[in-house]
Amino acid sequence: MKKILEVLRFGENDIRFHTDFDPVKNPALLPATTSDVAFSMATRLWGGNERSVLAMLRCLTIADIAMSVNRKQMIHWLEEESAILARSFREAMAEFQRSGGKVFTFAPGTSPSSEKN
């Protein structure tokens, strides 16, 4: 098991970050991990705590952009990369459905029935 990201608060202004990944040594981990995270978010692997996790991800993203030396460029890059991933994911889902697969959408915080896999 690898730790993607751990964020711990030790006090009022003492927030620490830990990860087992080193993108400098292996830059290919970033797009692969992004795809894996998107897949998990779109399946029952998400775990039912979406609201809390998404709120914290947004806090991290806003803080990252706020500290960026070029906010507009960072936002533009995030928009482009997320659009590419969204398009790819929609195409893969459509192909899955064309080949007979079923796609079910669950609202945030809703877990699928344990009777079906």
Image (cartoon, grey):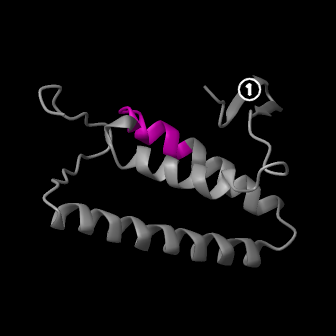
Q: Is residue 24 one of those drawn in magenta? A: no
> Which of the 4 image quarters holds residue 112?
top left
**Is 95 situated left or right of 90 in this image?**
left
Check residue 51 for magenta coloring: yes
Q: Secondary structure at mark 1?
A: strand
Q: Quadrant of residue 19?
A: top right
Residue in the picture at 73% in, 53% down: 63
In the displayed orientation, state which residue is furthest to the front.
Answer: 99
User: Label 1: which residue?
Assistant: 9
In the figure, 46 relative to 107: above or below?
A: above
Report the magenta stretch's main SS. Answer: helix
**Boundaries of the magenta span:** 46-55
Question: What residue do we see at 41% from left, 33% from top?
Answer: 49
Nearest the eye: 75 or 113 = 113
Could you tell me which quadrant the N terminus lies in? top right
Instruction: Give the farthest residue toward the top.
Output: 10
Give, as a three-letter code, the residue at label 1: Arg
Task: Pick out the residue farthest to the right.
Answer: 69
Q: Is residue 11 above or below residue 29?
A: above
**Residue 71, position in %: x, y?**
77, 72
Relative image position of residue 53 (x, y in whole percent): 51, 39
Residue at 75%, 78% in the rendered image: 73
How many marks can you see?
Answer: 1
